[in-house]
Amino acid sequence: MPKAITLIRSTELSDAAEYAYAATAPADARLIFLAGSCPLLKDGSTFGIGDFAAQAAQCVENMRQALAEAGAELEDVICTRVLVASSTQSDLVTAWEVVRDAFGDHDVPSTLIGVAALGYDHQLVEVEATAAVLD
């Protein structure tokens, strides 16, 4: 299936960012808006209590499942937002590196944000995403 996403990299902006600066989808693409992916197991318990990397990995796995049920995969994601319940930069980077590595060469535009708290008990990470597919 052809991909709907075009990642845009700038030669005029810093290459320190580990993602494309923008992305586009054609007008005939079907957009998929995902709820924030949380590190929850099927029974509703929080996975990886106290572990930023483990929670980020579980968020990605849950995102993969939601994408699959919508007829998409990680390579169809057009942007992400990674929320980390910490004011310590190294905690944010730990979560970010897991998400970044999961996407591999599909380095979609992303925002990394430290927040005061997230919605579930013991939750440290949440990943929001939007995808686009051609049907």
Image (cartoon, grey):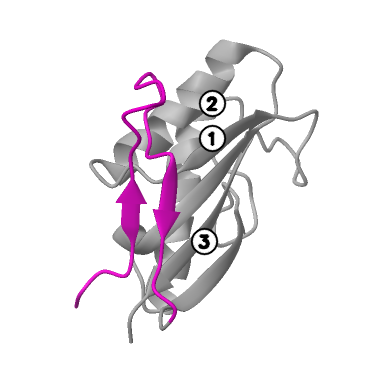
Q: Amino acid at mark 1?
A: Gly
Q: Is residue 51 visible?
A: yes
Quadrant location, the C terminus: bottom left
Q: Which residues are magenta?
A: 1-27
- Sequence-earlier tag: 3 or 1: 1
Residue at the location (49% across, 29% down)? 95
Question: Is 50 a magenta residue?
Answer: no
Q: Is residue 2 above or below residue 114?
A: below
Q: Which residue is mark 2?
A: 51
Q: Is residue 61 visible?
A: no
Nearer the observer, 27 or 121: 27
Q: Secondary structure at mark 3?
A: strand
Q: Amino acid at mark 2?
A: Asp
Q: Which residue is mark 1?
A: 48
Label 3 with label 1: CB-CB less than 8 Å? no
x, y percentage for residue 113?
Answer: 65, 31
x, y percentage for residue 90?
Answer: 54, 12
Residue at the location (61% across, 25% down)? 50
Q: Amino acid at mark 3?
A: Thr
Q: Nearer the viewer, mark 2 or mark 3?
A: 3
Residue at the location (40% across, 27% down)? 97
Nearer the observer, 30 or 86: 30
Quadrant location, the N terminus: bottom left
In terms of image quadrants, where is residue 10?
top left
Q: Which residue is mark 3?
A: 130
